[in-house]
């Protein structure tokens, strides 16, 4: 496995694929028991991975609890990321949710205890609550960095405008910088290309990418009527073959997989690795395996390189409309350049 510097705001080195621990535990009624979770964890480390992603609410806290045992022997060699905001359980109460400083500080202490560690390498606000001022979040992160409780603060599932404002506020107020964002991104979900990913590249923020297989949709297993899946047991965060675009995408994905003699899983992850190699900042897919077999099948993508033609076909099959103002801007480029090719940052002569 290759390694990447974690964006331009840090010198942290992380593996090109992160291990998501959302399936470590059975608190949601769908996940991995302790022994299977350990097999997944060991397989990821054997492949050269060093970046573990979890959250205080995953499996009602079971994920962090399991990881506390698994990480002990390798703690100094691992990058551990967790999140706060949504609470550990639905019964946690209103004071245990949100982006506010009270919840942040309490959540850090509880996660440190569950993980049995004295620091977190990366700490995300899990999702924007829509009310906490960005200044409050940033000051909280900065205090935790200065106290040695966390190394870096980050934002998950926040609108691009709030992230961009946070980046600027951290700079002008001399707070610890926002190091990264976390967003959903895959062949099945490319909305982040409109705002979040261009912003991350421009500002030098790393981007960790959740649900790289569209909740299992990109494996093709739902066409086969798989009943032992997130779609049937959890029914959340899953893409489905519900429109012509999704059918076209899956048809092309399966066709490329057949051409190469590999699984659709390999192709979906290889597409993300291609995008990461052509990005100016770190794009790190998060693997959310529930079994060791799923992990091994996903890691097989590390040896697969797609051709530019295959990438173009997948791009075309999964492309979204740019939307406003992006379509307007690109459509007007020729008019503003006088019909001549326009180089970046070059204004045509009068």
Image (spheres, rainbow, N blue to C red):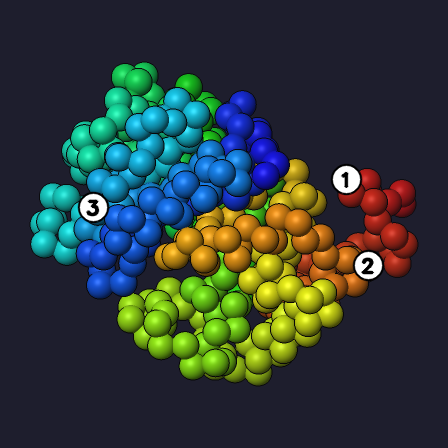
Residue drawn at 29 percent across, 71 percent down: 233
SS class, disc 3: helix
Seen in the picture, residue 196 relative to 203 is either above or below; the reply is below
Residues under numbered marks 1 and 2 in contact, where contact means CB atoms less than 8 Å apart: no
Q: Which residue is mark 3?
A: 61
How far is disc 3 from disc 2 in space, using C-alphas?
A: 54 Å
Toward the viewer: 153 or 276? 276
Residue 43 shown left or right of residue 34 in the figure: right
Residue 138 shown left or right of residue 271 in the figure: left
Numbered tag placed on residue 259 in the rendering: none
Please report whichever mark, 3 or 2, sits nearer to the chain's N-terminal start: 3
How far is disc 3 from disc 1 in space, using C-alphas?
A: 49 Å
Query: In this view of the protein, can residue 241 be seen by the observer?
Result: yes
Numbered tag placed on residue 334 in the rendering: 2
Residue 334 coordinates in the image, percent (x, y): 82, 59
Quarter residue 38 falls in: top left
Residue drawn at 46 percent across, 58 percent down: 294
- Count neighbours of disc 2 (C-alpha within 10 A) and say few if under 14, some if 14 to 19, many if 20 or more: few
Please report whichever mark, 1 or 2, sits nearer to the chain's N-terminal start: 2
How far is disc 1 from disc 2 in space, using C-alphas?
A: 15 Å
Please report whichever mark, 3 or 1, sits nearer to the chain's N-terminal start: 3
- Count neighbours of disc 1 (C-alpha within 10 A) and say few if under 14, some if 14 to 19, many if 20 or more: few
SS class, disc 1: loop
- Count neighbours of disc 3 (C-alpha within 10 A) and say few if under 14, some if 14 to 19, many if 20 or more: many
SS class, disc 2: helix
Q: Locate the N terminus and report the quarter of the image it occupies.
A: top right
Toward the viewer: 39 or 343? 39
Residue 138 coordinates in the image, percent (x, y): 34, 30
Q: Locate the C terminus and report the quarter of the image it occupies.
A: top right
* Tag nearer the camera, 3 or 2: 3
Seen in the picture, residue 198 relative to 142 is either above or below; the reply is below
Q: Total label count?
A: 3
């Amino acid at each position: 496995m290759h390694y990447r510097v974690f964006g331009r705001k840090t010198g942290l080195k992380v593996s090109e694929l992160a291990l998501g621990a959302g399936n470590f535990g059975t608190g949601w009624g769908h996940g991995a028991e302790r022994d299977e979770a350990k097999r997944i964890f060991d397989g990821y480390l054997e492949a050269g991975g060093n970046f573990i992603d979890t959250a205080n609410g995953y499996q009602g806290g079971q994920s962090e609890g399991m990881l506390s045992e698994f990480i002990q022997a390798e703690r100094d060699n691992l990058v551990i990321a967790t999140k706060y905001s949504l609470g550990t359980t639905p019964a946690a109460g209103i004071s245990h949710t949100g982006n506010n400083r009270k919840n942040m500080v309490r959540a850090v202490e509880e996660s440190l205890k569950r993980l049995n560690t004295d620091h977190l390498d990366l700490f995300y606000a899990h999702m924007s609550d829509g009310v906490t001022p960005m200044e409050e979040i940033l000051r909280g992160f900065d205090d935790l960095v200065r106290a040695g409780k966390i190394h870096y603060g980050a934002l998950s599932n926040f609108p691009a405008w709030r992230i961009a404002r946070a980046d600027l506020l951290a700079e002008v107020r001399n707070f610890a910088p926002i190091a990264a964002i976390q967003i959903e991104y895959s062949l099945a979900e490319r909305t982040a290309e409109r705002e979040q990913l261009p912003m991350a590249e421009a500002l030098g923020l790393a981007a960790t990418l959740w649900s790289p297989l569209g909740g299992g949709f990109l494996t093709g297993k739902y066409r086969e009527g798989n009943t032992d899946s997130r779609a049937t047991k959890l029914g959340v965060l899953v893409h489905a073959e519900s429109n012509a675009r999704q059918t076209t995408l899956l048809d092309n994905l399966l066709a490329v997989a057949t051409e190469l003699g590999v699984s659709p899983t390999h192709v979906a992850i290889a597409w993300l690795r291609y995008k990461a190699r052509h990005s100016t900042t770190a794009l790190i897919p998060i693997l959310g395996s529930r079994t060791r077999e799923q992990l091994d099948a996903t890691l097989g993508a590390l040896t697969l390189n797609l051709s530019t033609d295959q990438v173009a076909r997948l791009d075309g099959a999964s492309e979204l409309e740019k939307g406003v103002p992006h379509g307007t801007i690109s459509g007007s480029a020729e008019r503003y350049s006088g019909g001549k090719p326009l180089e970046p940052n070059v204004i045509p002569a009068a």
